[in-house]
Structures are given as C-alpha cells and as structure tokens.
Image: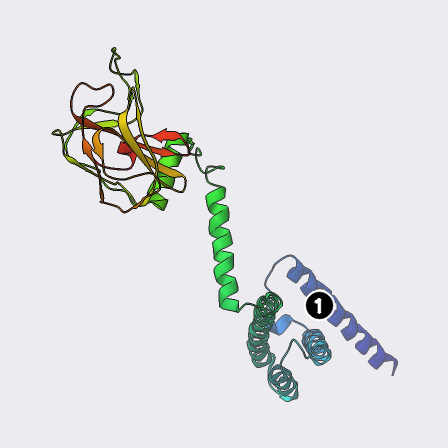
Amino acid sequence: MIIIERIISQQERISRAEEIYNRRKIDRGIRVPEKMVNKKAKKKRGYFKKFIFCINIYIIVIVAQNYNYIFSEDIIHKTQEILTYNVKVGEIYTKVVEGFVSIKNDVNSFFTQNKRQSTEEDSVGNGEMEGISQEEQINQEDDVISKNENEGAGIGGGPEEEVEKVEKTQMEIDAEYIKENCNLSLPIKGVVTSRFGVRESTDIISSNHKGIDIGANLGSIIKSSMDGVVTDVLTDEYYGKYLKVQDGEITTVYAHCQSIYVRKGDNVKLGQNIAEVGVTGKTTGPHLHFEIRRENRVVNPEYILTF
C-alpha cells in the first residue's frame, strides 16, 4: 500500500507539473500541442463558458418578458425556442444574433411609430381647437413661414434691399380720387397752346397757369366734360365769360367763352353742348381755358385726360 501511494503521489505531482508548464506556455503565447493540454481543465473551461452564456440568455428572456411593450411576442417565443434546443454553441450564437437583429428592427419601428402618432395628434388637436382642417392649417403654416422668410430677407443671407418710399403729392392724390369717382372726357378737340403750371408771364398771360388752353376756331362748340350741376355762370376781367359744372367734390371750369347755353342750377350730362369758344377776358386768341378742381384745389388736367 505504501508503494502504491507513493506511485500515485508521484503521478499526481507529474500531472500538476505538466499543467503548470503548459499554462505558462499558453500565457507566453507559445502554442502547445493538443495532446499535451490537460483535457479535464479544458473541458471544465468549456462548461464554464456555456454556463455564462446560458445565464446571459436567461437574463435577456427575463428582460423581454418584463418589457413586452418593446419586444414582440414573436421575439420572446423565438428566444425560448433557442434555449430548448440541445445544439452546439455556434448554432445558438447564430440564432441569438438573428434575434437581436429582429429586436433592433422592432425597437426602431416602435419609436418611429410613436413619434409619427404624436405629431399627428398635435396637428389634429390644433386644427380642432381652431376650427380648421389639417390641410388648411398646413397652408397657414406655409404662409407664416413664407411671410417670415420675406420679412427676414437680408438678415445674414445678403444685404437687404432698401425700398425708397416716394410720397405722393396732394395733386396726385386728388387726380387718383377724380379718376376713381368721376367719368371725364375732353370738352373740345384742338391743339394745346399752353399747359398747366408755371410759365413766362406778360400783361395778358399769368405766371401760374391753373388750367390748360386748347386752341379752337371762334364759335366752336364746348361740351360738358362730366355729369353735374351748373353752379356758376359769370363774367370777369381774367376769365371773361365762364361757367362751372360740379359733381360732389369735383368741379370743371370753362372760360373765355363767346356764349353760354346753360344757366345756374341746370343739370348737365357728359358730352352735352354748354358753350362756344370765344376771346373774352385776358386772351391772345380764341381758345378754351379748361380747369379741373377738387375742393378748390386745382389739378393738372393732363393727370386725368389725354389731350
């Protein structure tokens, strides 16, 4: 018995020495022949790795069951099937990788769907509160964006174009009002002998011409330039014989007449014969002096009519 014990003890010593020697070679990167590797140690290490892998799989299954709103039932079922298979580690690894790919797709789909649903609920909610459809709300948002882009032009994207504001004169404002509110026509056809505005004055010609002079033969017919009421039929040193036709704020004046066909208070129509061309008052020849006024403010007739 003593001899056997000594032999066994000696063999164990040798086996242990071989194990230590082989481990040191492995640590140093020296390849050890497979037959020299301790089979029991290698087998134990293989079981340990399988044990750790199985624990990880079970943890994943537990997490999946507790968070089933993220992982679908199909994924959980596949994972459970993998655990029941009595196959090699390589096959299990392949199936687990496929399962994780499917899980990743499910998670991405889950968050994408929730984001889209949240956006739609916000849009519908805003539309219902404001009493408009979703399409109208989108159009309004586009209008707001477009308006903001126009208002923000030149802020960082380039120099803002300066728009010069040109203020209209009172005469231009009056001319626009007359064209919008009254229908006027030429009182007579002829050649313009003196235009509206400043001119060289003489004993006969005034320096500030308040109308337009239209040359015509003596006795030519003058027609009313608009509908209205004859407010004045007068004679004075400058205008000679003249009359005024008024419609609301607008008045037309016909001067230097030879004769006048209408009387104060008469209603006249556009194009009606009202007088004849003459040379009365201060004049150098037969012509019609024609004025247009708005509330006693003279307006250049060429702003309104084409002569």
Name, please, the residue furthest toward the top. 203
Picture coordinates of residue 191 (x, y %)? 14, 29
Q: Residue at x 37, y 38 (%)?
A: 250
Picture coordinates of residue 48 (x, y %)? 72, 75
- Secondary structure, mark 1, is helix
Picture coordinates of residue 223 (x, y %)? 21, 40
Circle 1 is placed at which residue position?
18
Is residue 289 visible in the rendered image? The answer is yes
User: Up-down: is 97 above or below 296?
Assistant: below
Q: Quadrant of residue 290?
A: top left
Q: Residue at x 63, y 82 (%)?
A: 79
Is residue 166 visible in the rendered image? The answer is no
Question: Foreground residue, 267 or 118?
Answer: 267
Tell me: 193 left or right of 168.
Answer: left
Crowding at dot 1, Cα within 10 Å, few <14 / some 14-19 / many 20+, comes out as some
- Rendered-image quadrant of the N terminus: bottom right
Q: Amino acid at mark 1?
A: Glu
**Number of numbered discs:** 1
Name, please, the residue furthest toward the right. 2
Q: Quadrant of residue 58?
A: bottom right
Picture coordinates of residue 71 (x, y %)? 64, 78
- Rendered-image quadrant of the C terminus: top left
Tell me: 265 left or right of 278.
Answer: right
Question: Foreground residue, 81 or 206?
Answer: 206
User: Up-down: is 163 above or below 271?
Assistant: above
